[in-house]
Structures are given as C-alpha cells and as structure tokens.
Image: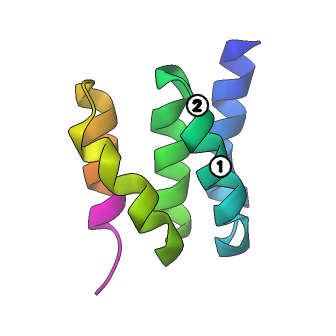
Amino acid sequence: LPELTMRIAGAMGEIAGPEDAPFLIDLLKKADRRFQQPLIRALGQIKAMEAIPALIPFLRSGYVGVRIEAMTALGGFEN
C-alpha cells in the first residue's frame, strides 16, 4: 500500500492543476517523509503560487532528498 500511495502522489503533478494545490498542500503537511518528495514534486509541477509558503520549510529538512526536491520545486516558479 505505501508503494501505491507514493506512485499516486507522484502522478498528481501530471494530472493535477493549480486548483488542486490546497489539497496537495494539506496532504504535504500531514505526510511522513516517504511521501514528502512526490508531493513536493507535484506542487512544483503545477506551479501554484500558494504552494510557495508550504514548500519553504522543506528547504531545511533533515533529509537531503526532500531539500533537493524543495529547491527544484521552488526554482521552477517564475518571478
């Protein structure tokens, strides 16, 4: 079940739109480390500006992969 959940979270960036950002942000706030990276990636892919404040704390994550994913996601937003 965790593997399926991770794959679903990863696919969210491909099928979700900016209108889904509140749902993804809420999931991210509750997610354990295994699910943070795909959810951060999804938020970066949909480029919803409201996701930026939710992504910033992950720049200080204790997990390198999560930090890199947050940097990548935030780097994809245009000024």
The residue positioned 39% from the left and 54% from the top of the image is: 55
Residue 18 lies, in percent from the top left, at 64, 73
**Which sits in the foreground, 14 or 5?**
5
Q: Which residue is mark 2?
A: 31
Q: Is residue 41 above or below residue 76?
A: above
Between disc 2 and disc 1, whose residue precedes? 1
From the viewer's perspective, is 11 left or right of 78?
A: right
Residue 28 lies, in percent from the top left, at 57, 42
Magenta stretch bounds: 73-79
Q: Is residue 79 above or below residue 53?
A: below
The residue positioned 65% from the left and 42% from the top of the image is: 27
The residue positioned 45% from the left and 36% from the top of the image is: 37
Q: Do the residues bearing badges 2 and 1 touch, measured as CB atoms within 8 Å?
A: no
The residue positioned 52% from the left and 38% from the top of the image is: 38
Q: Which residue is mark 1?
A: 26
Q: Is residue 19 magenta?
A: no
For label 1, the SS is helix
Q: CA distance from mark 2 to mark 1?
A: 9 Å
From the viewer's perspective, is 73 left or right of 23?
A: left
Please say whether residue 48 is visible from this viewpoint.
no
Q: What's the residue type where badge 2 is placed?
A: Ala
Residue 68 lies, in percent from the top left, at 25, 41
